[in-house]
């Protein structure tokens, strides 16, 4: 049997779609996703700006754009995967990097 998957676009989706006893775990894993994405984007932007690849005024919003909906798989594995995809060009949408984090949930 496959684990339930929830497509989330808004905070209201978490409330309306995720079972009450799984909301804390869902939010904890989504928080880890957001934190690692922001940290990765800040590091990449800093490096790219220093190398002249990005203009100094480039914002994180321009670099890290979420593809909605975000899919949360309630499989208990605690794995959070963040894929970086190419934004422009012939191969736009191709995965150019991926980070998977094993997260030990406090709420089970």
Image: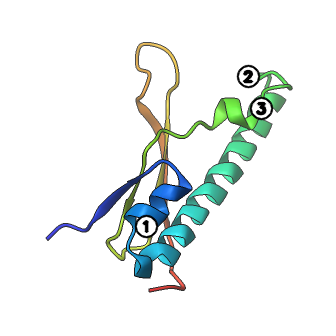
Q: Say left or right for 53 vs 32.
A: right
Q: How crowded is mark 1: few (under 14 residues within 10 Å), some or many (20 or more)?
A: some
Q: How crowded is mark 3: few (under 14 residues within 10 Å), some or many (20 or more)?
A: few
What residue is disc 1 on?
79
Residue at 48% x, 14% y is 89
Secondary structure type for disc 2:
loop
Secondary structure type for disc 1:
strand
In the rendering, at what x and y percent does residue 41 appear? 68, 43
In the rendering, at what x and y percent does residue 96 appear? 47, 35
Is the C-beta separation of discs 1 and 2 under 8 Å? no
Query: Measured along the vertical axis of the image, is residue 103 above or below residue 91?
Result: below
In the rendering, at what x and y percent does residue 37 appear? 62, 51
Query: Measured along the vertical axis of the image, is residue 34 above or below residue 28?
Result: above
* Distance from Cα at disc 3 to Cα at disc 1: 28 Å
| Disc nearer the start of the sequence (3/1) | 3
Assign the C terminus to one quadrant of the image.
bottom left
Secondary structure type for disc 3:
loop
Give the foreground label among 3 and 2.
3
Residue at 51% x, 18% y is 88
Colour scheme employed for the rendering of this structure: rainbow
* Distance from Cα at disc 3 to Cα at disc 2: 13 Å
Q: Residues within 10 Å of mark 2 (few under 14, many from 20)?
A: few
**Residue 25 numbered tag:** none
Question: Does residue 80 appear anywhere in the picture?
Answer: no
What residue is disc 3 on?
59
What residue is disc 2 on?
53
Give the foreground label among 3 and 1.
3
Q: Quadrant of residue 11?
A: bottom right
Q: Say left or right for 24 vs 35.
A: left
Is the C-beta separation of discs 3 and 2 under 8 Å? no
Residue at 86% x, 26% y is 56
């Amino acid at each position: 049997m496959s684990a339930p998957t929830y497509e989330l676009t808004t905070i209201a989706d978490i409330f309306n779609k995720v079972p009450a006893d799984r909301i804390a775990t869902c939010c904890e894993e989504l928080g880890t996703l957001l934190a690692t994405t922001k940290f990765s984007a800040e590091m990449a932007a800093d490096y790219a700006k220093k190398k002249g690849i990005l203009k100094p005024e480039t914002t994180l919003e321009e670099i890290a754009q979420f593809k909605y909906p975000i899919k949360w798989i309630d499989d208990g594995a605690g794995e959070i995967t963040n894929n970086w995809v190419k934004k422009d060009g012939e191969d736009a949408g191709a995965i150019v990097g991926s980070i998977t984090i094993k997260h030990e949930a406090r709420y089970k």
